[in-house]
Amino acid sequence: MKKLVVLFALISYSLLAQRLLAQVPPKPYGALPSERQLTWHDMEVYGLIHFTPTTYEDKEWGYGDADPKVFNPTDFDAEQIVLAAKAGGLRGLVLVAKHHDGFALWPTKTTDYNISKSPFRNGKGDMVREFEQAARKHGMQFGVYCSPWDRNSAAYGSPEYIKIYRDQLKELYTNYGPLIMSWHDGANGGDGYYGGAREKRSIDNTTYYGWDSTWTNLTRKLQPTANIFSDIGWDVRWVGNEKGIAGETHWATFTPQPPAGKNVAVPGQANYPDSPIGHRDGKYWMPAECDVPLRKGWFYHPNEKPRSPEELFDLYLKSVGRGAGLDLGLAPDTRGKLHEDDVASLKTFGEKLQKTFATNLAQSAFIRASNVRGFNSRYGTKNLVDGNKNTYWATDDDYKTPDLVIDMNQPKTFDIITLGEHIKLGQRIEAFAVDVQEGDGWKEIHTGTSVGAKRIVKLPAPVTAQKVRIRITKSPVGMAMSEVGIYKEAM
């Protein structure tokens, strides 16, 4: 009798321990995103606006010698640009406040080569302010890019210029509200006007700008919500191309490598070949931005046409759909508006996105998981279709290769499947497969690798099935997934 009592007590204790364990969330895995990075992931698609005197020169890069008086948009409308971007599904805009030509779109105190010397708004204009206000009015995130290279400044190449550049950043950081991004690139040094010297200047970009000091003492202190983008990240890394495409496998974690003989990685000296894919178990959470202009060039050229809505959708699948972000270059024309062709392409693209992902066929389906953490409904499959990224399906720690069966009650036709991890706990999945039921068996229709913030599987052709099975085939730890979707592409 005593043995039975002891056995019953042990069983009860074991069950109690399992229930208590089930209340404990899964442990995080690897590098984790910050709050500002989570906000960046939520943007998915945003725009980078190039508009300076270079627009009026029909060039891609200005030399810094254009007369400020050429910058005179006759019908500038920040709201038209913002609304066109929003109609295209963009959720944020990054304004090139100063490009390599050195012309500042705000009335800066640091240089005379700025918008106050142009006829725009009779010398009283502030284009950064107008874009910032229009973006916030329509619920879009706002960020800035201030080029470190300045082909107009006579001081470029000297220590004096670094103070000028940091003062420019300080003005942008303190006068235009909270920013989603502080965007930087590695372009620097070369031919320029340089205050009339008209010469070539070279700098050592591994030391000249002092990026660690700039980003630590200025950006992080004055704009704690701003994601720092550059070739080497800090928050967001460059994908390594200007095609708008991430690697089929995309790890949001990355370890920047210093150039040969140097101790620190810097913009312009990144390990680009690794950028499209990233590093599994990289030291930092540093997802890729896939930048690509809407037209052929970053600046407006009248002989170019925008990409088609179908091409934009394909870029979306190959950037956002691989866990990265899509940064689409927008180029106002000489009027100061987006061309009607650009507006039309963006609108149709935005409509296609909205229509395609409007109805999740998995939302009304019965979803059965092979394992739920501690049999606790807190981690159940309902979290996969509730539209809330803060809830998730989780498995027991030792259950690393679970599967989901999605029963849609009747045959449905689809060609898109989406998955999303609860990235607050890290990027866990290394391989997965998708099956559909055929008769009494299953037919594999797709295999993939990384998932991360979002994975969009676009099937080669539509499939009709009632049941879909998703198998996690490789992971170092148990699951923490927040999204499953089944869709039909809108034509």
Image (cartoon, rainbow, N blue to C red):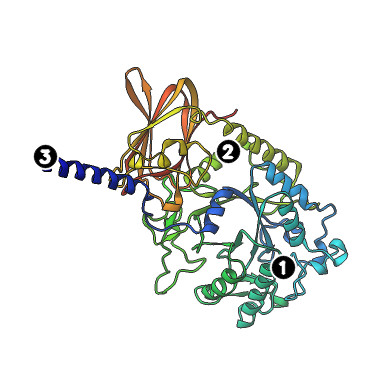
- Is residue 326 toward the left or the right of residue 454 in the image? right
- Residue 175 badge: 1
Closer to the camera, 215 or 243?
A: 215
- Measuring 72% from the left and 42% from the top, which residue is drawn there? 343
- Is residue 452 toward the left or the right of residue 337 in the image? left
SS category of the residue bearing label 2: helix
- Residue 1 badge: 3
Amino acid type for the residue under numbered disc 1: Asn
Question: How many labels sit on residues?
Answer: 3
Residue 159's x, y, as percent? 60, 82
Sooner in the amino-acid sequence: mark 3 or mark 1: 3
SS category of the residue bearing label 1: helix
Label 1 and label 2: CA atoms lie apart by 36 Å
- Measuring 29% from the left and 45% from the top, which residue is drawn there? 16
Q: Quadrant of the N terminus?
A: top left
> Please, is residue 65 above or below residue 19 in the view?
below
> Please, is residue 12 above or below residue 252 in the view?
above
For mark 3, does the 10 Å Cα neighbourhood hold few (<14), some (14 to 19), or many (20 or more) residues? Answer: few
Amino acid type for the residue under numbered disc 3: Met
- Residue 313 badge: 2
Q: Quadrant of residue 87?
A: top right
SS category of the residue bearing label 3: loop
